[in-house]
Amino acid sequence: MKILQILCIFASLFPITFCGLAVLAGGDVGGTLVEIYQAFIEQASRGGRKPYIGVITAGVTWSTAQSIANGIVYRFKSVYGVENVEWLPFHVSNGNICTSSSLNSKLRSMTGIYINGGDTELITDCLFPNGRITSALSVIQDRYHSNSLAVFASSAGVLALQSDSIIGPRESWSAIHYGASYDSLGGFDLFSYGFLDVHFSQRGRQGRLIRLTLDRRQESTKGFGIDESTAMVVDGGRFKVIGANAVYIVHVNEASIISGKRFAVNSVKVSRLTDGDSYSFNTGTITWGSSKSTLTSSRQSNVSARTSSDLFSPNMFATISTGLFKSKISASTFGLTSEVYPKYRVSMRKTSTSGGAIGTRNGLDVVSYRNMYADISCYSNC
């Protein structure tokens, strides 16, 4: 069991918190999602501290890193009123800065770190080369685990925080068919509760996170997929969802892989949390946001759940699965992959342990659910 997990178990028993403060965004946060930035600034100001934020943009080319960093620094200062913000020029193209201790004194003084996206390997190659913890990363880890440094990461920056294997570039059909791609070295060891994925619904990545979690379940039986314009706000052994879309939890503790020529699995649990919902890493308890109401039959419709012939197209998994919970006459539905050699089927079903909730955001219905069961099997050209 990893140090962070042990400390968080103690935090669940005693009125102390050693679980790290983090805002993990699924991408496309830009500068307009005020609530996500404010959540991070609040964490970086915890205990009455004046926020001092460092910006890391190691995941792109050197010239782009400089340009992006200037924009982020300007945004924090001009939009959010943070006076003390600066770029930390960690980059594989910047001499020996990645392995030196020259910026350690600043890291020890900062209250927050922002890690931008781009290319996960460029980020980890700088501060975690070939699985070796650099001096700067050691400072970041120590301060994060003691709750004195908040971390805000987006897109590829989120994947770099991984303790377990980092998910690779194969998308859903390829991952289901060939197996997940991954980097077994992991990343910065700041998130040890399960696997992470980003740009989740918008790029139809449900299949690849399911396959990774199955392939690597000796490391963890859970995966967390974060949509764009959405964030997991990690605080004290739990997280809360904020933003426009959803965070998915994939749990394979009950799943069974079916032997055969093609990949097949039964009983993968999938939950979908939206703005205001929260989750305990220690107990697995999901709590709906206070503005939501339970999806009982009186709130559901007589419309049958939809099916799909292209389940992993943008946002289709969300559409099909939430439609299942909005229907009181459908107990199951399914979606097919658009790829045909072979074509896979993902069956979705509700059970007695499933449940949903509904709320509104910007005048639109928002549906959350827990414990939807998904089965994957070969459908044709098997």
Image (cartoon, rainbow, N blue to C red):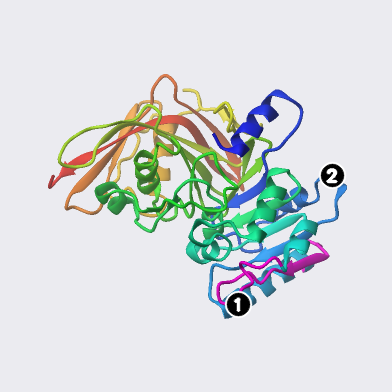
* Residue 73 seen from this side: yes
Which numbered marker is on residue 47?
2
Q: Which of the pair 171/380 is nearer the observer?
A: 171
Image position of 365 (left or right of 76): left
Measure the C-alpha gap from mark 1 to mark 2. Answer: 36 Å
- On-image quarter of the C terminus: top left
Amino acid carrying mark 2 in the image? Gly
Image position of 321 (left or right of 73): left
Image: 205 above or below 107 = above
> In the picture, residue 213 is in which quadrant?
top left
Find residue 262 and report its horizontal and vertical position in percent.
18, 42
SS assignment at label 1 = loop
Q: Residue at x 40, y 50 (%)?
A: 205
SS assignment at label 2 = helix
Please say whether residue 146 is one of the residues in the magenta stretch.
no
Q: What secondary structure is the magenta-colored segment mainly? A: loop
Find residue 225 and report its horizontal and vertical position in percent.
48, 46
Residue receiving disc 1: 95
Which numbered marker is on residue 65?
none
Residue at the extreme top of the image, as rendered: 352
